[in-house]
Amino acid sequence: MLDYTRGLPRLSRLESQQDLDLKGTSLVDLIGWMLADECERLLRDGLLQDYVTREETLPVLRGRLLVAQQVRRHMGRVDRLDCSFDELESDVLENRLLAAGLAADTGLRLGRDPDVLLRLRRAHAVFLEACDPRQLDLEAARVALDYHRRDEHYREAHQLAWLLLRGQALDDLFIRGSGRTQAFLIDMNRLFEDFVTRLLEEELALRGVSVHRQARDHNLVLDGSTGRGYSAIIPDVLLETGKTSIPLDIKYKLYDKRKLESGDIYQTFFYAYAGGSESGGARNGLLVYPSTQHVEPHHLVVRNANVHLWAIGLDVVKELARMRNGSASGCAPLIALVLELLKSG
């Protein structure tokens, strides 16, 4: 949903697919799987190499002779020469950081999924042949890394490795001291609202239906003494076509498994009664909630008010699969209901 609503390229770049058992599995398994993806991509394209300056004692001259060191250590000898030369090697900072992130004493001890651990161990073995992570200074590495054209393709793999290396968590919530941690939180209410709104915009744009996000109206609730607007009414979405309008409320709640809450019914009714227009002799209001299966819409009728409320679930899993496959068919239950209600007006 983040990828669809925000256009994140991160999600579309994952080439592999893995179903993780949620029972006993942590977020570290997902991070480890993504890190394995990135490391395998780097291995396929070829690991970064750079010239590293070496100083060794050799039987023949290579590079330049370290005169002062030669005189001090091997005076008069020509079979032992202290040389300084540049060697093209893969034992560079960029590879050392990934090897450390894949190491058994960091990422591997945190994961629980056996398939994730297997992929990480395989990648770790290859990186150990290319570099020596024991010489890595993490604090110095964070300062020294300055991405440019030559190593920009390492950036995402490094970000994942840092998550494992830094251990972004607290072992003991009640321990004394100044320990710090970070949290990755998503406002699912806002995300689901953006997800549904964009779906409606894409599916209804070619059908002559206007989709208004957060349509604010100050003229529905008035101050009785002044006649001025007292409070703004802001439904999540307002659908309009011709003279017909239907307000739509979006809730990130599992209403496919339980009854609608009274507060949500009252809110949807108020939007429909005050902000909707009559369609087929009645005013309609919609409430959309997430679902993982097809569920028939809940249809509520408010007596003496001529208001019909519809609560319908959006099969998120099915919609995401449709987007990945590039299917042209829309989210049929929701769109079909919207078009039916608008057509009757």
Image (tube, rainbow, N blue to C red):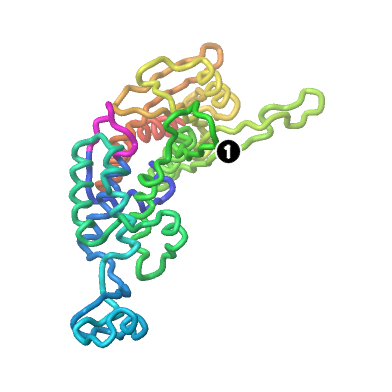
Looking at the picture, tell me which residue is in the foreground, 274 or 260.
260
Image location of residue 147, percent across then percent down = 41, 65
Looking at the picture, tell me which residue is in the foreground, 312 or 259.
259
Q: Residue furthest top?
A: 303
Three-letter amino acid code of the residue under disc 1: Ala
- Name the residue rendered at 50%, 22% in the picture: 282
Judging by the rendered image, the residue that carries numbered circle 1 is: 215
- Name the residue rendered at 48%, 16% in the picture: 261
- Quick check: can you spot residue 240? no
Q: Which corner quadrant of the image does residue 56 belong to?
A: bottom left
Name the side, left or right, on which 41 lies relative to 256.
Answer: left
Q: Residue furthest right?
A: 225
Image location of residue 50, percent across then percent down = 30, 72
- State yes or no: residue 129 in magenta: no
Figure check: 152 above or below 242 = below
Q: Residues within 10 Å of mark 1 (few under 14, many from 20)?
A: some
The mark total stands at 1
The magenta span reads 19-29
Image location of residue 301, percent across then percent down = 47, 15
Image location of residue 298, percent across then percent down = 39, 19
**Where the N terminus falls, by quadrant?**
top left
Q: From the image, give the main secondary structure of the stretch colored magenta.
A: loop
- Quick check: can you spot residue 26? yes
Name the side, left or right, on which 42 lies relative to 243.
Answer: left
